[in-house]
Image (spheres, grey):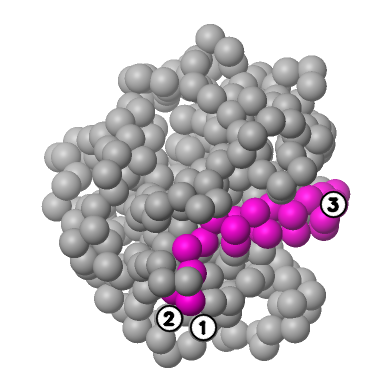
Amino acid sequence: MSGPRRIAARLLTWVVAVLATTGAALPALDLADQMNPAAKVSVDKALAFLANNQRADGSFNDWGGGASGIVASIQIAFMAAGQVPGEGTYGHVTAKATQYLLSCAQTNGLLYRPESGGPPMYNHGLATLALAEVWGMTADPRVRNAVQKAVDLICSSQNQKGGWRYQPKISDDDLSVTVMQLMALRAARDAGIAVPKEVIDAGIEYVKRCHNPKSQGKDGGFGYTPGGGSGAARTGAGVTSLQVAGDYRSSEVQEGVEYLLGCQPLGKRAEENDSHRWYGLYYSTAGIYLSQSIGTWGKNAWAQWYPAMVKQLTAEQKPTGKWEGSHGLYPTAMGVVILSIPYRYLPLYQR
């Protein structure tokens, strides 16, 4: 079975299982190529650029190319475009990236290289997510063992409020780190790894406490911590994580999507911190895509958002295939993931 077909078969199994547990009606699953032609060309250029910048050990050139979070982001980009480790045009890239991520594993399960810098749990969450998807595609027992230990670490470091912070220990919390752990846990659970339901439920409750409800005279977005001011990146993260957990029709999701529609590329709101821009564009696009399950309102939101995003990103892409921004190759990886969401090769993008 080819790489994309294998992923498609896995998606169908995943969607049936999730909808069975949530009681949702099974939507028509059409895995035909829904990509905007300009987006497809852009993705192909970016993948070639990333592949040409991989080192022999599986890491990548440019700033932070040895950090597990950067390697994981690039790995996710290739898999979002249907590139299974060891198969297809870029199977060698994803295979080497997998081996590199496994080499980052510490004895306590932390997927992180201290010399690479950056907050450990950001890197760990992204690496756990990437390897969970790899395990689901390859059934490699080495990957499964690494993911299980990574999941155990996430669960043991959740604080009493349901959140996580920068270090792999019980500490304070913030939305951005919490969402990354929730995404990793959901991907692991979808791939058959044991994840306690109460850990995910507590994390979702934390995310909801970061919402700024309109019923209280606020703007409907999400803050960095409970009670904090709203922002585009954190609102996208909040909306996406709630829907990934199966909570599609809550007021927090609808108000969050409404907030996002007032952000760039459609509205005037912009992410105030450039280092958060690509993170925000990714989560915002994923969240609005998933909101189509709300009904016509969500489908209209996606119909407005995605073409505007394609226009913006294709205009910004360099002739080499790279996107510029903070954190080295991370913007290019996120550009691929954003534009590839209609492929629906990763279960996290299934409604």
Q: Which residue is mark 2?
A: 298
Answer few, some or many: residues within 10 Å of disc 3's Cα (few below 14, many 20 plus, some between 14 and 19). Answer: few
Instruction: Identify which residue is drawn at 64% across, 34% down.
Output: 172
For the C terminus, the image quarter is: bottom right
Tell me where residue 350 sits by quadrant. bottom right
Q: Are marks 1 and 2 in contact (CB under 8 Å)?
A: yes
Q: Give left or right: position of 133 versus 46.
A: right
**SS for tag 3?**
loop
User: N-terminal of the two: label 1 or label 3?
Assistant: 3
SS under mark 1: helix
Q: Is residue 202 magenta?
A: yes
Residue 174 image-quadrant placement: top right
| Residue hosting label 1 | 294
Q: Which residue is mark 3?
A: 196
Q: Is residue 174 visible?
A: yes
Local crowd size for mark 2, using a 10 Å CA cut-off: few (<14), some (14–19), many (≥20): some
Dominant SS type (magenta): helix
Dot 2 falls on a residue whose secondary structure is helix
Name the spot of residue 70 as percent of width and height, x first: 47, 30
Marks 1 and 3, Cα distance to the nearest angstrom?
27 Å
| Region in magenta | 194-215
Label 3 or label 2, whichever comes before in sequence order: 3
User: Given the image, on which type of amino acid does mark 3 rest?
Assistant: Pro
Q: CA distance from mark 1 to mark 2?
A: 6 Å
Please state the horizontal and vertical placement of residue 316, each as a whole percent of the image.
16, 47
